[in-house]
Amino acid sequence: MNTVNKDIFIRCIFCIPFIWCFSGLFLYADANKELALLTFVVFLFSIFNLGPKQILQQINERRITWLFITMSIIAIVGKLTNGYSSSELRVLLSLTLLSIITPKNSLQYLKKNLSSLSVLGCLVSFIYCYYEAITLGTPRPSWGINPIPYTTFTASVVIMCLWFSFHEHRKKNQILLCIASLIGASAILISQTRGTLLALILAFIYLIIFSSIKKDLIFKLLIPIIIIGFTFGYFNNNKIEQRYLQTKHEYTQIMNGNLNTSIGYRLQMWQAGYELSKSPTFLGLGSNHIEKKQELYEEGKISLGSVKWTHYHNQYITTFIKNGIIGFLLLLSLISIPIIYHKKLVNSRNADSHIGILALIVFLTASLTDIPFSQPVTLAFYGILMMIITLGDEATDID
């Protein structure tokens, strides 16, 4: 094997766990175990190909690595004391290792091909959602992967495809990216997840208003997107109508004092979280939060319906209660990654910092009704995406 082919082979090996987070991770439940296995294999591979000197240098230079290390340490402490999700800990350790061992040339290669990874994510999302909802007819609560965090990933890759389509100069690629984004959006409609659809809409508004793209180009691309979008909407009309009627019914029930609905349960969980947050802890309550909720119920402060849930259908409340003040600060640090990166490049010719902001908007909106930063699949995807964007920053230079 000559030197050029050997370099390509080594670079591709390091890319495998990253590609997995846009594909295999979202094909079946517990795929985060395979991510951990792939990471460990690549880690062993890196020992022989990078050497300790380069690995130590990458640790010292990468702030995101130190964030993942800190989060992993806190997660281990939580696991040994109050309880912590094994899957989430596994993902954090995988992200830590990947941020340490992945060389810059592999990250640059991934960033150059991020549009292709986004297209792959849209296709995988559609295949999975169609298979679960249409082919098998599986009810949403019984999907192998929870449809809410699943479509948080979907909304992220959809908005990324749209961003790339607006900045792509070749018409064939523009068309491919637009079709991929609409296929991904159709997956969200199939899954009937209201929160992620709202997140996608808000991210799209940001894309139109704040991205550095020419308005005439937006107009030219919006027409076919709207036409194709209405076509997809027509074929998903029954799903949309069904979800609309359900939302309308739930609203009526809440107005009549009945909180035993999907939205009503969330309101009860938020109330329970509010009561628990009055007595904040340093490292959080962990698994003991359910016992605390039972005590609040017996005191008549919260409803019985809010006691059994393992989280609060809100990332900010859940993190503050279960992981404490330290966990909440680490969450804010995780959220700040694309913001700091965007601020760093705001006056440069590099426009790709918007990708991180768009994904962040999706995650922040989804965090109002779910826990994407605590779900293994979405946490892995977010961490991987932030690594590609911030550590491969020499790869993309878009006018």
Image: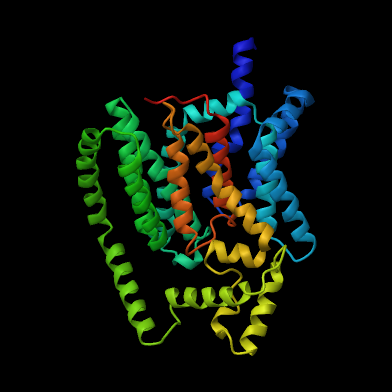
User: Does residue 124 appear in the picture of this structure?
Assistant: no
> Relative to 394, is 59 above or below?
below
Displayed quadrant of residue 391: top right
The residue that appears at 46% across and 26% down in the rendered structure is: 396
Displayed quadrant of residue 85: bottom right
Q: Nearer the viewer, residue 135 or 326?
A: 326
The residue that appears at 24% across and 33% down in the rendered structure is: 217
Q: Is residue 142 left or right of residue 281?
A: left
Colour scheme employed for the rendering of this structure? rainbow
Outermost residue to the front = 347
> Relative to 40, is 249 above or below?
below
- Residue 268 in the image, given as x and y percentages of width and height: 51, 78
- Residue 171 in the image, given as x and y percentages of width and height: 27, 27
> Where does the C terminus fall, quadrant-wise?
top left
Q: Is residue 276 left or right of residue 370?
A: right
The residue that appears at 57% across and 77% down in the rendered structure is: 272
User: Does residue 209 appear in the picture of this structure?
Assistant: yes
Q: Nearer the viewer, residue 95 or 6?
A: 95
Q: Is residue 130 left or right of residue 220?
A: right
Q: Is residue 241 left or right of residue 36?
A: left
Q: How many marks?
A: 0
- Residue 326 in the image, given as x and y percentages of width and height: 68, 58
The residue that appears at 48% across and 73% down in the rendered structure is: 266
> Where does the N terminus fall, quadrant-wise?
top right
- Residue 22 in the image, given as x and y percentages of width and height: 51, 41
